[in-house]
Amino acid sequence: MMNKLVLSVLAAAALSADSTELQSLKAQMAQMEAMMKAMQAKIDTLESTRTSPAPLAAAEEKPTSKLVDAVAKTTSGLDLSLILDASYVSRSKKDEVTQHLELPGVAHGLIGSHSHDGHDHATYNASNGFNLNYAELAIHSTVDPYLDANAVFHFSEDSVEIEEAYVTTRALPYNFRARGGKFLSDFGRLNNQHHHAWNFSDMPLVYEAFLGNHGINEIGAQLQWVAPTSNYLMVGFEALQGKNEAMFGQAAINNPSEGYEEEILAGSAHQPSLLIGYVKTSADIGDTTILAGASIANGKSRIDHFSDETPHAFAGESDLYGLDLTVKHYFDSYSSLTWQSEWLYRDMEGTQFSDPDADVTTNNLVSPTMHKKQSGYYTQLVYAPDQTWKIGARYDNIYRNDVIKNGVDQEQPEHMDQYSAMIEYNTSEFARYRLQYTHSNALFDEEGNRRTLDSLIFSINVALGTHAAHSF
């Protein structure tokens, strides 16, 4: 462009015959060339200052971009959900009465809050009136081609705890599957199900009496094997730390009396102290599916309830046996009838520590031998006519209660039973409304008198986010 301009000026000059004018034009042309070079230099400078910040901006955006990519990559395979459960409860007795009701020789503190080891424990639907039972945060993700990871955080009004946190293998050979961490044991039928998956708003009586409100929820390892057969057949084994407050335990028990706190009444058990084995099978007959299982748990018992209203402790060894049967018939894709039953039997043998005056500040403990043989069951029937409605009934009974102390039968009450009925409505798979009525003949007051109790529970359960489907 510059050369064309120069040639144009020379041509114009050539048209002029005057040499003086020619020299003048040459001078002007030189000035113009100088001006154009200066302008070109300015243009180059401006262009360089405009393009130089670009690499800096790119450098600043890089970490943010990487973080966004990392978050997107992480959350793309993450199932994240929040379960909210609340209820309104109306019982025929006041809270201060129900908190002292018990199953003699079996369990206490089944209704309302109570404390062990200085910690308060509240059951579901604990009080008359409104209850916020929990908010449960569940996370699931595939780690890599070899592992899945799950975590469930249980929030209550007063505390938060890790209900489950474990990894599960995805690709072990020969149909093996391993799991490690804290998890709900696959003992029996109901134990590995979360509260929001139950068909009733409370735990079956025999489960809660033998294992407490949390069931067998332990830190340990699990190994399962599925047989290469046409019908489902699974065998499992678990080695667990053994911290169940109602039946198993591994920590040492010390004398609670003042001045004797260093005295060990029962030493700690070798860990893991709880071993569990089970076999489960299933078969389809037309539109009916049958699932059956047999389970056994053996572990050390170190139960320290010295901080209870009636202080006591137990050290020994315990066995728990379980049989379960579920039959589900499908009328169509959304309509079904399910019959589910479980039977439990426990055998606990060891030494009981207690104070006849219920005053552990003085060293007045007695330690008789104790042998318990107790069994019970629940059976329930649930009909789902469509996707939205369910109705059901359940019967609970602890029919055997042999408690032998120093070889003498304590003649504890038996046939402690209760009836429940429920109806529920699901506006969607994310929201459920349930009304349950229970009439209980199972409970006794502290004087040993049987007390009937009627309970009406209206509960709401809401699920937010992505939650994996529950197993059959």
Image (spheres, rainbow, N blue to C red):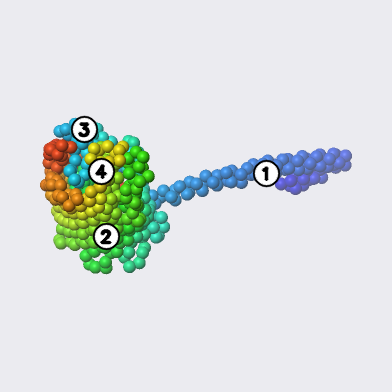
The image's mark for residue 95 is 3
Q: Is residue 247 visible?
A: no
Q: As drawn, is 428 to the left or to the right of 61?
A: left
The image's mark for residue 48 is 1
Q: Position of residue 283 (x, y in %)?
A: 19, 62
Q: Position of residue 118 (x, y in %)?
A: 33, 39
Foreground residue, 222 or 258?
Answer: 258
Residue 315 versus residue 261 in the image, above or below: below
Q: As drawn, is 5 to the left or to the right of 452?
A: right
> Mark 1 and mark 2: span between their CA atoms?
75 Å
Q: Is residue 368 visible?
A: yes
Q: Position of residue 399 (x, y in %)?
A: 13, 49
Foreground residue, 90 or 213?
Answer: 213
Label located before the other in sequence (4 or 1): 1
> Mark 4 and mark 1: span between their CA atoms?
89 Å
What amino acid type is highlighted by mark number 2?
A: Gly
Residue depicted at 40% across the width and 60% down the height: 145
What amino acid type is highlighted by mark number 3?
A: Asp
- Please state which of the two labelled residues, at mark 3 or mark 1, is closer to the viewer: 3
What amino acid type is highlighted by mark number 1?
A: Ser
- Please state which of the two labelled residues, at mark 1 or mark 2, is closer to the viewer: 2
Residue of label 4:
354
Do tag 3 and tag 4 residues touch (Cβ < 8 Å)? no
The image's mark for residue 277 is 2
Q: As drawn, is 146 to the left or to the right of 198?
A: right
Residue depicted at 25% across the width and 41% down the height: 355
> Mark 3 and mark 2: span between their CA atoms?
39 Å
- Please state which of the two labelled residues, at mark 4 or mark 1, is closer to the viewer: 4
